[in-house]
Image: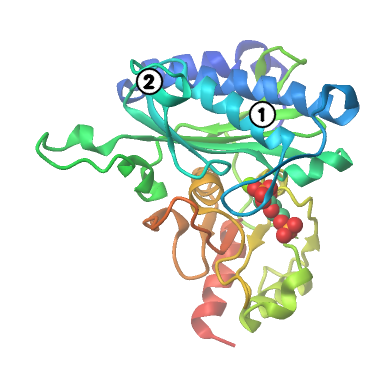
């Protein structure tokens, strides 16, 4: 996963996607969708920088509305949502998009106000994850995933659930990725055959390959968990974190805490350095905070593709069949051996 100037000269994100979607016919129509996502991320990166230094642009703070989960929407949440939805839909290959910021999935024909826009894919995204970090100038990110409409493979007589594509388990994702807006803007992508990271060379420029074939170390040295609510955790989770700290049963590697508070940034570090990101359930919120469709599934596909694991503690995240579009799940994601320790501990009980 080292930075390779020679490779980066040859490979940009758009070239990589072009070659991969040409080699794999089932992905052919994804090429323009990915190019829409790439330009959306480029645009959001520019806006995030402006939001942090240009009060006149009015990009700061709350827009006054709340989203379906009752959270205050920031101006930037709404902007990023609209940019991403329009860019994903514009090539005419998507049927609909489902966003953390929208109450219901939206048909692309509605997003673009043109009935002609109806394709074979459906997208899920969290347009600006960790947006409460913006005020303090800290990292935020975009998370996305793409499914194929399953009824295309089924008998024409079968009744169609309009949202069938995104109610599939995450294991059916064709592609997923995130874009981290931090010290660098980095887009990390999987098309189901490995994980690659591309860094925005300059504002508005190309994403160049800087992290080819990312592999997460089998054992990590850090954990990214908000321990504030730990008194409300299942005691076995508290025991797991205690063991991580001490390196007990964790390959004798004491883990340090590192928490940014934006899942994209925290999972990115875990992917690069190894370790665990977790958002466990609590007594008052048994499913935790992380949304299955927009956050847990795309991140789980990426981390599994890089050789890691992702679980609720008892079930593989990518095997879960969603029951509602804004469903939340407890998540433990990261280095294989670190996650296996948790699974063993939950099995044996404490
Ligand atoms: P958001 O999508 O509303 O921004 O919430 C998700 C974010 C994650 O990025 C992050 O890991 C988590 O919320 C942080 O929450 P907390 O402050 O409870 O640790
Ligand atoms: Mg989020």
Most foreground residue, 202 or 56: 56
Provide the residue designation for mark 2: 93
Q: Which quadrant of the figure has residue 155? A: top left
The residue carrying mark 1 has its beta carbon less than 8 Å from ligand 1? no
Q: Nearer the viewer, mark 1 or mark 2?
A: 1
Measured as percent of width and height from the top left, residue 30 is found at 41, 22
| Residue 312 visible in image | yes
The first of marks 1 and 2 along the sequence is 1
| Mark 1, secondary structure of its residue | helix
* Colouring scheme applied when the structure was drawn: rainbow
| Mark 2, secondary structure of its residue | loop
The quadrant of the picture occupied by the C terminus is bottom right
Q: Residue at x 53, y 36 (%)?
A: 144
Measured as percent of width and height from the top left, residue 196 is found at 58, 31
Q: Estimate how packed mark 2 is, as few (under 14), some (14 to 19) or many (20 or more) residues with alpha carbons within 10 Å.
A: many
Q: Residue at x 44, y 19 (%)?
A: 113
Please give left or right for residue 6 compared with residue 154 in the image: right
The quadrant of the picture occupied by the N terminus is top right
| Residue 274 visible in image | no
Q: Estimate how packed mark 1 is, as few (under 14), some (14 to 19) or many (20 or more) residues with alpha carbons within 10 Å.
A: some
Provide the residue designation for mark 1: 79
Please give left or right for residue 89 compared with residue 252 in the image: left
Q: Which quadrant of the figure has residue 234? A: bottom right
């Amino acid at each position: 996963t080292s930075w390779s100037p020679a490779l980066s000269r040859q490979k940009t994100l758009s070239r990589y996607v072009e070659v991969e979607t040409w080699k794999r016919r089932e992905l052919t129509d994804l090429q323009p969708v990915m190019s829409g996502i790439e330009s959306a991320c480029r645009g959001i990166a520019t806006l995030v920088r402006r939001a942090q230094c240009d009060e006149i642009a009015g990009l700061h703070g709350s827009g006054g509305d709340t989203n379906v989960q009752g959270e205050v929407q920031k101006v930037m949440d709404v902007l990023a949502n609209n940019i991403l939805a329009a860019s994903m839909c514009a090539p005419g290959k998507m049927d609909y998009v489902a966003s953390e910021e929208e109450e219901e999935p939206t048909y692309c024909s509605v997003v673009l106000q043109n009935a002609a826009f109806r394709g074979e894919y459906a997208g899920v995204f969290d347009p600006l994850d960790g947006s409460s970090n913006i005020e303090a100038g800290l990292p935020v990110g975009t998370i996305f995933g793409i499914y194929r409409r399953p009824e295309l493979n089924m008998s024409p007589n079968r009744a169609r659930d309009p949202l069938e594509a995104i109610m599939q388990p995450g294991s059916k994702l064709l592609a997923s990725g995130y874009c981290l807006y931090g010290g660098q803007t980095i887009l990390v992508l999987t098309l189901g055959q490995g994980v690659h990271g591309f860094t925005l060379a300059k504002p508005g420029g190309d994403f160049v390959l800087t992290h080819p074939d990312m592999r997460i170390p089998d054992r990590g040295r850090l954990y990214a968990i908000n321990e504030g609510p730990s008194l409300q955790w299942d005691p076995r989770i508290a025991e797991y974190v205690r063991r991580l700290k001490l390196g007990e049963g964790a390959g004798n590697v004491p883990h340090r805490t590192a928490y940014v508070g934006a899942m994209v940034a925290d999972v990115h570090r875990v992917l690069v350095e190894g370790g665990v990101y977790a958002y466990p359930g609590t007594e008052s919120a048994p499913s935790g905070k992380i949304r299955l469709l927009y956050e847990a599934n795309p991140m789980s596909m990426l981390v599994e593709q890089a050789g890691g694991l992702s679980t609720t503690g008892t079930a593989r995240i990518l095997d879960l069949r969603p029951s509602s579009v804004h469903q939340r799940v407890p998540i433990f994601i990261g280095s294989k051996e670190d996650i296996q320790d948790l699974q063993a501990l939950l099995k044996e009980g404490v």
